[in-house]
Amino acid sequence: MAEAANVRQNLQNVPSIFEISASETLDNLIYPALSKIFDYFGLRLDFKLWGSLRIQEELSPLLTWLLQYLYLRKRASSFGESFYGLQRTVTTTGDLLNRRQQFASATLLTFMPYVERKLRTRITRHEDTSPWEQRLLSAFHAFHAAKAAHTFFYLVKYASNHSPIFRLLGLTLRYPSEPPKEDQWTYVVLKMLEVLAFFLQFVQWWYSNDQRRKVGGTLINPEAMPRKQLPKEVQQSLPQRGECPVCLLSIQTPTACSVSGYVFCWKCIVSHMKEHGTCPVTHYPISLDDLVRIYET
Amino acid sequence: MEKNKYVPRVNQIDAIYLNKDIARLIRDNLLENLQAISPVLFIKIQPELDLIIQSAIWFGSVGKRCSTFGQQLLVLAYDAEKLTVSRLVLHFILTVLPGYVKSWEERRLTRRVEWFSEAIMWVENSALILNILNYFRFLKTGRKPTLVDYLLGLDYISLRNNQRRDIGYKYLTRELLWGGFMEILGLVLPIINFRKLQRVLKSWTFSGRRLEDRDGPAFLAPQMTLSTTCTFCGERPTLPHHMGCGHIYCYYCLNANVLTDASFCCPNCGSACPESGIQSV
């Protein structure tokens, strides 16, 4: 879709639908890439300082809002729109955005995808969702359908803006009449953010590839763990294959302990775990989460 | 003023592809969201919805402005003098209705199923062959790129006198540059041994601290608890093993790392693997 944005031969000097779609796609890439970065840092830097609270779920929208607000203040366009050379103007007067419109644009750009993402996550996890959440998600679907219809009206020149949100805010997208004037510091910051846009796309491209790319090469597969050498009289008294180490009978409802690897009866291992809290053979501390039910075909 | 008759072939082909992209963009967005709202109702009326959307797109583009959306993007149009009312009706019938008729066959509404499906298949194959032949004729003459245009005798004209094809190379250059850079990174990153780089950097920065660590206790007994996780993979350890520094690994994680990297060090404390190798907890 970004390739089609290169075709810019409009008679009316209005952005084509491909440029608008490409800029929206770039805006939507910010949150997933930031989440990936925060997940990586959370794993490596051990964010246990924050406790069990998923702080990155709230930090990514905040950073996204700050990024969009900075671009709206400096260039009167969102991050993706600035990348494709577009600018937001007031529909009636053609002026640039004022402070209130900048704030409203940044908030709507960040808040609506955030709420929709939360709703979809809760519904896909099959949590106890109330009927109003289902209706709110249906309202989001209706909004996207209305947005597609509005895009059609924009194409046939019945609407001067491409989205119901733009109509609500009274804004349109145009090509800027003159290049933006900015000081040295702003220029450096915006250039760094443009390089950041590349890395956002790179992170998204890296994780979306079907090939499992492994950084640092693959690990060599080791051999199976060697068996311990035991005296002969001890070996004779060991349980045979298929026997439970606790009750020494045939295994009923086989359950494996993922820490030690031994297979027990479900009743034997659960009762022993509740009584002692350890594996009967190796004495490793185990809990109910370490038990894995084995289903034989 | 004589109207501009010459239109480059590449512009005509681009107009067709751009129009397909725009129609697919609008149609897929609408249908996807309407389906999410009410899946059961959507299945029943999907062909009618599709027909309505395609008709609206046709009326908004060809019916209203004598040019498709793709042609408008490239400042092209059909010749308005040749586009009479009868030809407009025929254009609508030949471009929008075949999809709807095909959906009849898919829904098995008609009684004479075999005869109807065979007829549709025959018409479809004939149209495909004629489209291919017309494409070769278009490459030769440079006029009427699609079969419908040829049947109706419609020509593309340019609305600007300047015939030079204007392409915005700024964004294309950026896309090519960064796309190529991403490909290079994708090739190079799997080759680099980041573990070795990480260990070298750590040894440089903590060289003083390493000297102190070597004077410390040579062996630390690992403690297995309910909340112990593998130092490498972060999950509960499977067949827990250690390398003398007190940190617990899965058997696979520790042995695979030691086999892959002979001088593997503990990520937490930087201790090297002793000569006696890994041991079970």
Image (cartoon, coloured by chain):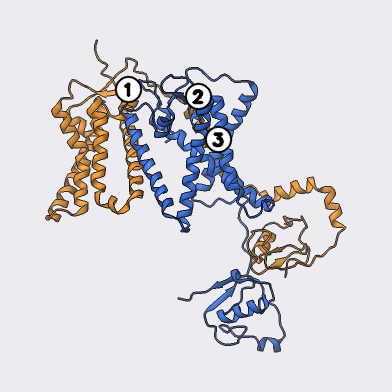
| Residue wearing tag 1 | B75
Q: Colour of chain B?
A: orange
Expressed as whole percent of the image width and height from the top left, the position of residue B18 reads 34, 32
Residue at image point 73% right, 50% down: B199
Furthest toward the right, the residue is: B215
| Residue wearing tag 3 | A197
First in residue order: circle 2 vs circle 3: 2
Q: Are marks 2 and 1 in contact (CB under 8 Å)?
A: no
**Residue B130 lies in quadrant:** top left
| Residue wearing tag 2 | A97
The blue one among the chains is A
Q: Circle 1 sits in a helix, a strand or a loop, which is it?
A: loop
Q: Nearer the viewer, mark 2 or mark 1?
A: 2
**Residue A37 lies in quadrant:** top right
Expressed as whole percent of the image width and height from the top left, the position of residue B94 reads 18, 36
Query: Can residue B266 be seen in this snapshot?
Result: yes
